[in-house]
Image (spheres, grey):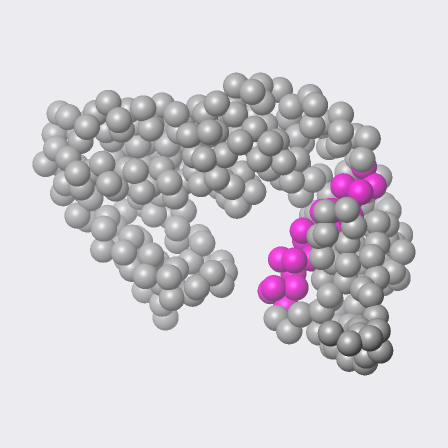
Amino acid sequence: MGGGEGRPAPTATYTAWTFGELPELMEIRRGPLSLIGFPALIDKATHVEIEVFDEPDVAAAKHRAGLRRLVALQLREPLKYLEKNIPDLTLMAAAYMSVGGSVDELRAQIIEVALERAFLAEPLPADAPAFARRVDEGRARLNLIAQEVTRQAHAVLAEHAVAARKLKDARPAKETADDAAAQLARLVPKRFLAETPWTALSHLPRYLKGVTLRLDKWRADPTRDASRLAELRPLEQRYLRRVAELKGASDARLDEFRWLLEELRVSLFAQELRTPQPVSVKRLEKAWTQLSG
């Protein structure tokens, strides 16, 4: 590369909201280039930067992470305290290791979700005064919210450990074992806390308990399990195909259907746990037709 001429100007970095209002569409200059798009704060760990994106969905997802970082930069001391005082973290970390995560990753995820719930309710702040108000309001709730997030994580990891142990000990038929293992991996991936919608998170322990009960029942009646799985499979395969076609793009109705499938599993394999609404193969067939229409 030659001399300094013609290089783009360095990107501005921020550790506080000192960049004015963030409009819906924004023009930013990068040296000789002028870029127009949807603005987003970008998380750079020690600071944030502003970038623009062609896709509003991409901008929105990036912006949430950037805004969360900007909040965290205003709360260095409270967050240090919180990181050192998460109850039962070591105990949970032992169970969390079984899904491939470390104690540091679990801690970071608890903090991430607590910040999200304490500070990032819609509509998100779009200027400095609104941001300052949001930081002040959330600060008082942060510890309580972090305790609630920790309780949820604890409940999920405890039930996951029981179900995983049951799967190992029960040694069911390959089809049942593969299906249960795939369900456990889907319900509790490494970033389950951050990636599961808050409304669904409280149901995860029941879904996991459903896996344990199903494996208990399998021994008494393997044929029944196989026939229930045959009922479920076509619906689930259609859903998984659609997810693959979307290649990571989000679809709110498809997400809703995903949780209906989990409720259907409870209804088919562990009825005694009950579902919040009536579910059946027929109802889900109808929901799928509406979703595909």
Query: Which portion, as a residue range, is magenta?
Result: 56-75
Examine the structure image and report whether residue 68 is included in the region drawn in magenta: yes
The answer to whether residue 144 is left or right of residue 271 is right
Question: Number of marks in the image?
Answer: 0
Task: Classify residue 79 by image quadrant.
Answer: top right
The one nearer the camera, 229 or 289, is: 229
Quadrant including the N terminus? bottom right
Q: Which residue is drawn at 74% across and 58% down?
A: 41
Q: Looking at this view, is 257 or 171 the one in front?
A: 171
The picture places residue 217, in percent across and down from the top left corner, at 19, 27
Tell me if residue 39 comes above or below residue 180 in the rendering: below
Give the image location of residue 91, x and y in percent: 52, 19
Q: In which quarter of the image is the C terminus?
A: bottom left
- The residue lying toward the viewer, choosing from 164 and 133, is 164
Q: Is residue 268 visible?
A: no
| Residue 86, horizontal then vertical, whole percent | 65, 23
Q: Is residue 46 left or right of residue 278?
A: right
Name the magenta segment's main secondary structure.
Answer: helix
List x then y, in percent, for residue 135: 81, 42
For residue 127, above or below residue 215: below
Lateral position of residue 40 relative to residue 177, left or right: right
